[in-house]
Image: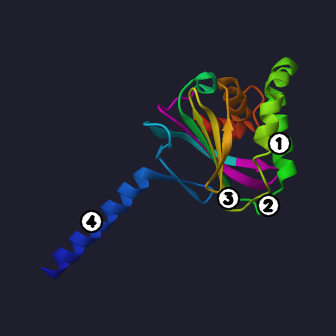
Amino acid sequence: MGDTIVKLLFSLFVLLLSVTDAWSKDVGGVTLSEQVNVDGSNETLQLNGAGIRKKFFFSIYVAALYMPEKTGDAEKIINADVTKRVLMHFVYSEVEKEKMRSGWDEGFSDNRSSDEMKVLRKRLDNFNAMFDTLHEGDVVLLDYLPSVGTRVTVRGEQKGIIPGADFNQALMSVWLGASPVTSSLKSALLGN
């Protein structure tokens, strides 16, 4: 009888571990939820894909893309006027605010025409102003809410909202556009 109880408890423990694994995914030492609820939305978003942003040989952050439905179509994700989230969990010791800002500027300008950049410039400057130096363990949430805009949350503090679907399309292009920050991260965010 004692062996039966031990076996039953062990089986229950293994079952609980496997269920927990089904609800989360580990990427680069960061545990990501398979589903998230976004404040201000009634939708549950699915983890579309996740990967590591590397520069040279260094891991900078783990990125995760959440969508209402999984898709491997980058253009569909960029242009979809639906609730979506990009989570950035920093794993590098320190990323200075100037490097963050120049990275955003480069990512936007690499994927948008000069005319589009003129329209986006003031909003991009406002977006850049929301970022301070980031450290290992810091989390940035970029939540797009249709007809509201892109809400920026850094370390659990809401920094502001950048209006416009066009801004979010440009932001998503940083990772998923024709000139993504890295092709390996683009592929990972698309679920490949």
Q: Position of residue 43 (x, y in %)?
A: 44, 36
Mark 4 Cα-neighbour bin, 10 Å: few <14, some 14–19, many ≥20: few
Q: CA distance from mark 2 to mark 1?
A: 14 Å
Q: Tell which circle, 2 or 1, labels the residue nearer the N-terminal end.
A: 2
The answer to which quarter of the image holds residue 58 is bottom right
Q: Secondary structure at mark 1?
A: helix
| Residue range corresponding to the magenta coloring | 53-72
Mark earlier in primary sequence (2, 3): 2
Please report contact status of discs 2 and 3: CB closer than 8 Å, yes or no.
no
What number is the disc on residue 94? 2
Q: Which residue is mark 4?
A: 12
Q: Which residue is mark 3?
A: 138
- Residue 47: in magenta span: no
Which of the two labelled residues, at mark 3 and mark 1, occupies the earlier sequence position? 1
Q: Which residue is nearer to you in this view: 8 or 82?
A: 82
Identify which residue is drawn at 47% across, 46% down: 34
Q: Quadrant of the N terminus?
A: bottom left
CA distance separating discs 1 and 4: 47 Å
Residue at the location (47% across, 31% down)? 69
Secondary structure of the residue carrying tag 3 is loop
Q: Position of residue 101 (x, y in %)?
A: 83, 44
